[in-house]
Image: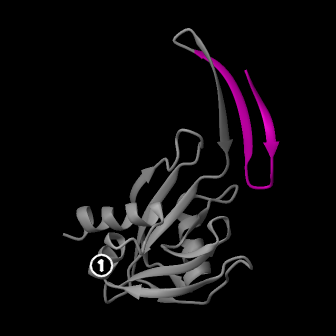
Amino acid sequence: MSKVVYRSKMFEVEKHRVRMRDHPFTFHVVKGPDTVSVVALLRDNRIILERQYRYPIRRYIYEIPAGHIDAGETQKHAAARELEEETGYAAGSLDVLFKSYPSPGIKTELSTAYLARGLKKTRLDRDPDELMTLRYVGLKEAMAMIRKNKIIDQKTIAALLFYSNFIKR
């Protein structure tokens, strides 16, 4: 049995009562849009990072461009849109790096990480709540930022490590 216990513009929370191994359990499941993130490579192989203010943790952190997939939008279109809105660059090519569930114990969100190459400067079109500046770093510097806990965003760490270990060899 499940029932919606909270609904907002971006997500809803369902309460599920289930039996597993003959024991009753209650799960709260957060249902919302899937997400995309982008490792964006400039022609000189520098990576675009965003230093973005995140209200829930009340601090600025480094991230790769990312966002939600809008209703009726494909993953690839969302990745291209988020990249251009947040950085002012359009991708010549977008390739899937990997798919993952960031928090499968509570959320249904599927996140797809992309690699963007052949970037061309366009224009910024950020949302009003996106307080950020861009930083351009080489892969070696990005790895040092992860090691020194200067990059603490999970999707960014996963995407950069994936790129470093499986693509950029």
Badge 1 amino acid: Leu
Q: Quadrant of the C terminus?
A: bottom left
Magenta highlight on residue 92: no
- Secondary structure mostly seen in the magenta stretch: strand
Residue drawn at the location 60% of the way across and 43% of the way down: 107
Front in this rendered view, residue 154 or 167 = 154
The colouring scheme, among rainbow, by chain, secondary structure or one colour, is one colour
The extreme top residue here reads: 22
Residue drawn at the location 54% of the way across and 38% of the way down: 105
Vertical position of residue 88 compared to residue 151: above or below: below
Where is residue 123, by image quadrant? Answer: bottom right
Vertical position of residue 140 compared to residue 101: above or below: below
- Which element type, helix, strand or loop, lies under badge 1? helix
Residue drawn at the location 39% of the way across and 65% of the way down: 157
Q: Is residue 36 left or right of residue 146?
A: right
Vertical position of residue 78 compared to residue 103: above or below: below
Image x and y of residue 1, in percent: 73, 20
Q: Is residue 158 left or right of residue 134?
A: left
Image x and y of residue 59, in percent: 60, 74
Q: Is residue 101 left or right of residue 1?
A: left
Image x and y of residue 163, in percent: 31, 66
Disc 1: CA contacts within 10 A as few (<14), some (14-19) or many (>=20) = some
Magenta highlight on residue 18: yes
Residue drawn at the location 67% of the way across and 49% of the way down: 32
The residue identified by callout 1 is: 139
Where is residue 73, by image quadrant? Answer: bottom right
Q: Which residues are magenta?
A: 1-19
